[in-house]
Image: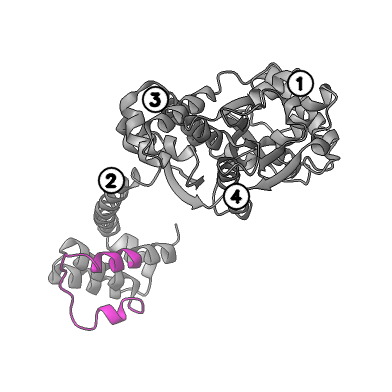
Amino acid sequence: MKRVGINALIAKTIYLLSKSDRSYPMEAGQGGQLFSAHPTEFYLTLCRYLCSFTKKEANNYLKTCKQTDSHESCSTDRIGGFSSFLFECVCMTFNAFLMSLCLFVSSNSFAVEKPLLRIGVQAAGTLEWELAVLKNDPQLNASDFQLELLSVANAEAGKIALQSGAVDMIVSDWIWVSSLRATGADFTFYPYSNTSGALVVAENSPIRSINDLKGKRLGIAGGELDKNWILLQALAQKESLDLNASVEKTFGAPPLINEQLKQERVDAVLTFWHFAARLEAQGYRQIIDGRGILKGLGITEDLPSIGYVFKQSWGIAHQAALNSFLKATKLAKSRLCTSDSDWQKIIPLTKTDDVPTQAILRQRYCEGEVEQWGDNEQQAAARIYSLLRTLTNNRLTGASETLQAGTFWTQP
């Protein structure tokens, strides 16, 4: 190492040590002349500062050194072992400083090393139930990730938050993921739940099958492109019924659609599963659910209706934390379905004090547990995609003729 480099290193050391609690006596004016003094005087001043070198010893060395015009001779031949002494002194002092710094850093680093997963959560969604279990259970909470939850008003707000980078993950559907991948985005999907919506009527309703809907008033949660509505029409077509032309349709948000049925302004509702469950708890009757519709269309595999959606590149970069999170949430779901004590803890999140409603919500939620997800299920999803594309004339799926590769997350 060049002497200039040594000087800079030692000067930096002096500065760091001058900020510490140790006190080193220096004569007035020495600090200001530190960089302009004779090189050996620089080292001697440093030695006195760092190593308790006496003033007499320093002056003797300096007097000998200044008798020659050769700084190199002074620093090596004339001073003898002084440079090695200085080096040892500086190293010991600097190493002590570094050891203290390393101990400080290492003692605080473990608290911040866990990757942070930012998740968009709908206030009325069941994901909030599972995350509450994670938060309240020390064993599950000891996983190698930490969570930051961002409340989103609805599904569309969650999509915006994900695409803008405000969150790393939301719960959404795989049709949307495929449509995004067709535009070059790298979002991907991992199954969360098989539970889907249901067709519900009043207990005393004459409606017993899809064919009985002809000429009736039907409330549809969501919109014209709701997947359950499109697939219900496909099932009706198999029975030679043009459902779209045969019913009086009312579209709206799930809570409003439920109220329409209670006030007898519609004869039946096709709504999201947890709103259907609340109706069932009040005595209303289910005609068919999303799983039944798929079976009627020849799809025997249980397909996820919704799942975790995140960027594929993000998933690869956070693979260990992501896998740990998916494992932990699966265990949390299982706990909610098998442990009454765990279920009791999240009851306030169901937003109901009615015990029968709580029971049917738990039943339907647990029926949606994903037990199998492999090639057969993904091939079935591709068939459903083709059907939805045809029925909606690309309006739901986008322009891609087939389900986009990479739509479903494959753990590397």
**Distance of label 1 from label 4 (alpha carbons):** 33 Å
CA gap, disc 3 and disc 2: 34 Å
Q: Which residue is mark 4?
A: 162
Q: Residues within 10 Å of mark 3 (few under 14, many from 20)?
A: some
Image coords of residue 58 (percent x, y): 19, 69
Judging from the image, what secondary structure is the residue with disc 1 in? loop
Q: Are marks 2 and 1 in contact (CB under 8 Å)?
A: no
Q: Earlier in the sequence, mark 2 or mark 1?
A: 2
Residue pictured at 64% horizontal, 39% vertical: 312
Q: Position of residue 282 (x, y in %)?
A: 48, 33
Residue type at the position of mark 1:
Leu
Where's residue 216, x and y in %? 73, 36
| 116 displayed left or right of 393 | left
Q: Residue at x 18, y 61 (%)?
A: 51
Q: Earlier in the sequence, mark 1 or mark 4?
A: 4
- Identify residue for label 3: 335
Please say if the residues under marks 4 and 3 sit with CB atoms less than 8 Å apart. no
Pick whichever, 140 or 359, lies toward us.
359
Q: Which mark is residue 219?
A: none
Eye-nearest disc, 3 or 2: 3
Q: Which residue is mark 1?
A: 297
Mark 4 or 3 closer to N-term? 4
